[in-house]
Image (cartoon, grey):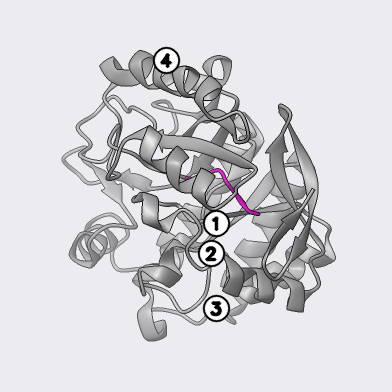
Amino acid sequence: MWANFHTHSHYCDGVGKLSEYADAAQQKGMSSLGFSSHAPVSFPCTWCMKRENLEAYLKNINSLKPLYPALQLYKGMEVDYIPGIVSPLDFKKVLDYSIGSIHFVDQFPDGKHWEIDGAHSVFLNGLENIFNNNIRHAITRYFELTREMVESSNPDVIGHLDKIKIQNSKEKFFKESDFWYKAEIIRTLDAIQKAGSIVEVNTRGLYQKKSETPYPSPWILEIINQRNIPVTLNSDAHHPQDIASQFEETASLLLAIGFKKISILRDGSWKPATLTPHGIAL
């Protein structure tokens, strides 16, 4: 069996109702499933939940729980961290857990927020107009915000830690072995370790063929394992069919690195589960 805590339904930019994700998880014999629509923000966002739908979203999850007695369902959201605008702390009281992620880094001169994991043309525009084409400064700011999020709001799970790398295809801008980049990763892992947050191993880049490795990269996962920082395996599914996409392949990678357990939500709290090539053992 598996578990997954990063899913996006029709409440945000996903395809399918919550019940369709629960059906897919039940068919795969999953132990736990977390719903994590993109949290509302205070500015126009095409892929975020509308604030007026938040109550319906939470009620929808609660209504499904008795219908799936063998599958534990949890209320979560993927919450952006934008200083002074939104934080995982904003929704803590109404959720079972939160995934904290960085999708926006600073603003254009006109005040529009720069989305760093969308269209490459948007990334290039922000890199030029906000950071004067200095990729090191842009990447450094991304990880600074990640650390600030961890230290100020301590989300349960840190979402796709190094997702900004999708803009660095064929190492167009930098090498992950560059000293400054590795230093940013180490500083960020220091903050995560101190906070006690869980790092998600996110497979979406793999099955979308936008990345040759999961988020985070294998060399980062090696450091995470050495430090005994807990991880959880998520697919960041935007369609019910992707509820466990690339899980077996990524589990094999984690096992080869040395991971023996991953964290899952079970009976209301995060607990370690034994990892195998074909699932988890409770």
Q: Amino acid at mark 1?
A: Leu
- Mark 3 lies on residue: 176
Q: Quadrant of residue 49?
A: top left
Q: Along the horizontal axis of the image, is 161 left or right of 36?
A: right
In the image, which residues are magenta? 1-6
Residue at the extreme bottom: 170
Disc sitting over residue 59 in the figure? 4
Residue at 32%, 59% (x, y): give it. 131
Residue 79 visible at all: no
Marks 1 and 2: in contact by CB < 8 Å?
A: yes
Mark 4 or mark 1, which has the lower sequence index?
Answer: 4
Mark 3 or mark 1, which has the lower sequence index?
Answer: 1
Residue 187 within the magenta-colored segment of the rendering: no
Q: Amino acid at mark 3?
A: Glu
Mark 4 nearby-residue class (10 Å; few <14, some 14–19, many ≥20): few
Q: Indicate whether 99 appears above or below 246.
A: above
- Mark 1 lies on residue: 161
- Give the CA separation, mark 3 to mark 4: 43 Å
Q: Amino acid at mark 4?
A: Lys
